[in-house]
Image (spheres, coloured by chain):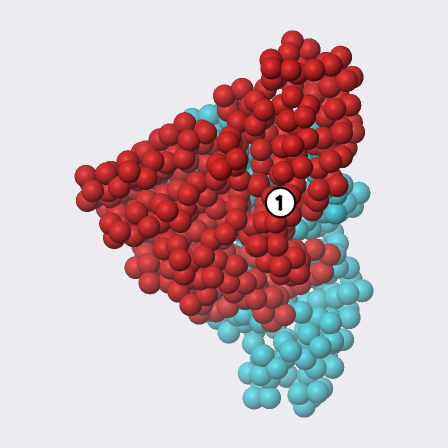
Chain colours: A red, B cyan
Amino acid sequence: MGRDLGSRDAGFLALNREVLERLAEIANASGTHVAVPIPGSGTFAVEAMLTTLVPRTGKVLLLVNGVRGQRAKRICLVAGRRIAVHETREEAPPDLEALDGALRADPTITHVFVVHCETASGILNPVAEIADVVATHGRRLLIDAASAFGALPLDAASTTFDAVAAASDRCLEGVPGLGFVICREASLAQARGNAASLALDLHDQWQHLATTGRYRFASLTQVIAALHQALGELRAEGGPPGRNRRYAQNCKVLIEGMRELGFRPLLPERLQSPILVAFRMPKAGKFLFHDFCDKLEARGYVIDPGTHGLYGCFHIGCIGRLDAGHMRGAVSAVAEVLAELGISSLGSAA
Amino acid sequence: MGRDLGSRDAGFLALNREVLERLAEIANASGTHVAVPIPGSGTFAVEAMLTTLVPRTGKVLLLVNGVRGQRAKRICLVAGRRIAVHETREEAPPDLEALDGALRADPTITHVFVVHCETASGILNPVAEIADVVATHGRRLLIDAASAFGALPLDAASTTFDAVAAASDRCLEGVPGLGFVICREASLAQARGNAASLALDLHDQWQHLATTGRYRFASLTQVIAALHQALGELRAEGGPPGRNRRYAQNCKVLIEGMRELGFRPLLPERLQSPILVAFRMPKAGKFLFHDFCDKLEARGYVIDPGTHGLYGCFHIGCIGRLDAGHMRGAVSAVAEVLAELGISSLGSAA
């Protein structure tokens, strides 16, 4: 980030091209898809995806089981896109038979939207199976992978999708600031004029980059340079499989340690992503969550003090420059904080 | 940027509040306006301003004399906002009598939009005089100050405006990534539901920040921390007046030096902002612009290799961490490059 690069400088433009090519490669989508950057965050990329790729005459079936799914619903309603919603509880993945039935019953549904990994619960949605159902019906799949991209497997050769939206931070371990959407080129080519926004028009951004090599507006040189470095580190770690292994190990250490202290994860193992873990809020009277967070922070462990209305849960992340040693440290800190709060055992109350 | 801050951490949230308060202070707008951040760039902020503050039943008179004005026009057309356009040549400011006449003739115009300083030409538009005309007619002024904010004077106490859009880079000398709009609070409060975008809805962002202190989506912690540092440096330089003095000196050194070499600025002195200078492209046959840029870059001076369709001009910026010494160095490098290209004199050909 400390390098001073001109946004129209040939060196920067080459670095930017390399970043975009590498992003498509991560989803094994180089031949079929193009990565289109959208400054902002993962949500900016999700809005750009939904409003550029779903035509104004289209209809999206939203698979909702958490905050990111709810947000996609809001995006569609605000933008005036027609929707149908298949909603399940935060600890339940979408029902594949219900999906099949919904697509069979409503031929006006053009697109299906799913969140790869939900932010608050950490649930892993079965994207590959969903993709098969959607493809069988000849509809198009749009994926919000903001919490998953770069670590959870996503292979365009075996999972049919039209687009996946994500961002420079989270599992890619860059700094926040750059969203992107990896779009099937043939679909993007049909999307001219769909967006009701200039800033979030993927087609316009794509065409401008393709013809000039440059960003339409100010480009985020420092954020993109940091992402270039982060993608090199991802490659050095063995790509998404290597990163997934480290996160899975982090997650395992965290869950085992927290279980020993009496905490219970929200999700069963088969639905648990290695990205973050939601734990049920202990019912012990001495467990005051904000105190708990503050005392953890004093020990150098910052967890999200928000609960996101998630059925009385809190969550702890497993991603970033963290390894099993850090996670063991976090568990030890939790044990110390419980002792300081005068809680000897969470017992069955947790 | 190297500090690792949690996006929901109390320390970061305090730093963010300080940044937003300081941005409103720079426009002397603390009591009346609020600064609302929009990740992206200045153009994202401009789109958020136009589409959140102009209701769908509103109509904007766009004062256009360059690329940023043209872009605002595109934003309005794509978003379906009704417009009227007063367009002047790139080296001509808006005509105040024509503005007065247009507002008199069309009472359905609710807003007027102007660019404080145009990007390609460097023209300084008379924002204060325009604001007086707009206020006389009881209409609302929206300003794109992406190229000007932090250096050119803008005082909410003497210049009546509803909103001004800008970004973390340019004259604020932060890194690119965060746009913002300083909005009259009373107007913003009326803007609920105007936007057809969730990401670019200033009202929603404002309400969420006001009630929770947090960003709705991922927040750009590194970019915001860098902006905090940059705002401290601006204050240390004496605020916008101090920065304006340095840029004006840079501009003077550049223009005088380039004139001596035979280059002619596009604009007369009274229209020339201290932000960047457009020079007429020399007509000498040996002057190949791309060669010129490459040879300057080899000497450590990067200028924009684009001409932005600006009447056969190129431009050189005066902003950033540069002082008169750097500008003298740039002029010397230009002289060397001319000699290397075998151009002894641009004479009257320039």
Q: Residue at x 47, y 61 (%)?
A: A28
Q: Quadrant of the N terminus of chain A?
A: bottom right
Compared to residue B49, the image places residue A279 above or below, namely above
Compared to residue A65, the image places residue A28 above or below, namely below
What SS does tag 1 mark?
helix
- Residue B145 in the image: state x and y as whole percent: 56, 47
Position of residue A36 in the picture relative to residue B33 (left or right)? left
In this figure, which residue is indicated by the disc labeled 1?
Answer: A247
- Residue A251 in the image: state x and y as whole percent: 62, 38
Q: How many marks?
A: 1
**B195 or A109, nearer to the observer:** A109
Q: Residues within 10 Å of mark 1 (few under 14, many from 20)?
A: many
Position of residue B51 in the picture relative to residue B239 (left or right)? left
Compared to residue A82, the image places residue A89 above or below, namely above
Q: Which residue, as the protein is rendered here, is positioned at the far bottom?
A: B342
Q: Residue at x 74, y 39 (%)?
A: A326
In this orientation, does residue B39 appear?
Answer: yes
Compared to residue A103, the image places residue A37 above or below, namely below
- Residue B121 in the image: state x and y as whole percent: 54, 62
> Residue B124 occupies which quadrant of the picture?
bottom right
> Residue B166 occupies which quadrant of the picture?
top right
Q: Tell me the kind of residue under disc 1.
A: Tyr
Q: Residue at x 62, y 23 (%)?
A: A263
Q: Residue at x 78, y 23 (%)?
A: A336
Q: Quadrant of the C terminus of chain A?
A: top right
